[in-house]
Image (cartoon, rainbow, N blue to C red):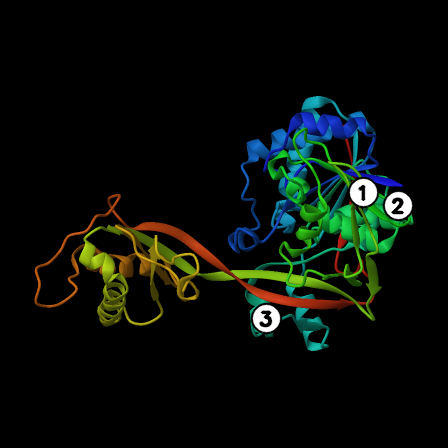
Amino acid sequence: MVKVLIPSGALGLGYDRKALARGITEKPDIIAIDGGSTDSGPHYLGTGTSKYARGSTKAEWRELMEARAEAGVPLIIGTAGTCGADSAVDWLVDITREIVAETGMKVKLAVLKSGQRQDALIDAFGQGKITPLKPAPELSEDVIASCSNIVALAGAEQIKAALETGADIVIAGRTTDTAIISALPLSRGCHPGGAWHGAKIGECGALATTAPNSGTILIEFDAEGFTISPMGVEARATPHTVSAHMLYENSNPDILYEPGGHLDVSAAKYEALDDRRVRVSGSEWVVSDCYTVKLEGARLAGFQTVSLVTVRDPRYVANIRAWCDDIAIKATEKARARVGEGFEIELRLIGLDATLGALDTGAKAGTEVGVLGLVTAPTESLSREVAKVLNPYLLHHPLTEEEEMPTFAFPFSPPEVSRGAVYEFCLNHVLKLEDPMEAFTLTIEELGQ
């Protein structure tokens, strides 16, 4: 049996300290936590930075390092620094060094990096080793070369290699959410289907329970499946909460693709052991013909300036789409006459359909709509210039030429706010590997010696 303690869905989100302490008393074999994802957009991979505050990250990481020392087991984090880029890994390594220096700990640290060299990927692309996932943007050598950061998602094999070094702490770059949980059970001979399925259920901590914010759960893996036990006092795992998590961030509730194969849970059985714990068996791991890892890449998309105006006049609110469409046409024409091509003006309706846009067919206007203007251009100065062309339209543009000029409300002055550089994802592909470690680097460092 292998016990994996998962403090929360991600480092920086917070967790129930009493639940973590309760988990330590259960004598886990490893503490595993995720460090990020692509949920917050391409900026973090594009810049190689973390979305979480350094102070909060350091405070939580210190607590987990102390819990690791108390339990005497390895501590592992995947997708360090939100995006898993090499610079984000270095950021967390620096924090770890600080904590070791401040506490007097002695730690053997393994660092697994997932960053990819552009020239190596261009060669792989030319050899046909990179293939698209659906949907995927068109890929070319120029696209690869334009990326500021590219990462490969490590699987269980790379994590096992890091754990086999005997490290106290493993800081990994971009990994699949499940790899850091499944690796140890797999290496110790637990049921492969159960290892991957339990890892999927545990990837977000207590999200698969009745008290998602409690954070900490314990998963026990064995030769036939796994058992999930929430550590929060109020949290309960039920067959419904556990089975439903296969729908989370997954297009197929029965199949989950990972490096080296896929998980099939179509025959899984979920049994409530009591009012808090659930036992799962019957999951199957299917080995693939070749070993592939997913690639993620981000590149500079331009510079952006944003403006916000609020509209309350009932007539304008009722005709807000026509008003915005007219502004977009006229402001674009005017800006092109003054600065030329190369920019984009987009108006999003806050309080109507800003989240889903045209997909939100049931959107209804209320008493007030916020109009968010986004101007994207190759340079920051050009984006600001075009945003200033847009300004008077947002403030005074009438619905028709015959009516008086209206005035709307800017919530701040000046209304133009520069967002600086903006990034876009440009890779949704897989890379074929002959050796699972060939796209990754693993180093060891002794701290506090």
Circle 3 crowding by C-alpha within 10 Å: few under 14, some 14–19, many from 20: few
Q: Which residue is mark 1?
A: 227
Q: Position of residue 83 (x, y in %)?
A: 61, 50
**Residues at marks 3 and 2, CA–CA distance in whole angstroms:** 38 Å
Mark 2 surroundings: few (<14), some (14-19) or many (≥20) residues within 10 A: many
Report the front residue among 338 and 242: 242
Q: In this figure, which residue is indicated by the disc labeled 3?
A: 136
Percent from the top left, x then y, of residue 254?
A: 72, 61
Q: Which mark is residue 222?
A: 2
Camera-side residue of 413 and 336: 413
Label 3 residue SS: loop
Please name the amino acid that badge 2 sits on.
Asp
User: At label 1, which amino acid type do we have?
Assistant: Thr
- In primary-sequence order, the first of circles 3 and 1 is 3
Q: Is residue 392 visible?
A: no
**Label pair 2/1, CB-CB below 8 angstroms:** yes
* Residue sitting at x 81%, y 56%: 283
Q: Is residue 350 above or below residue 75?
A: below
Residue 173's spot in the image, x, y percent?
A: 69, 49
Q: Quadrant of residue 277?
A: top right
Between marks 2 and 1, how big is the CA–CA gap?
Answer: 9 Å
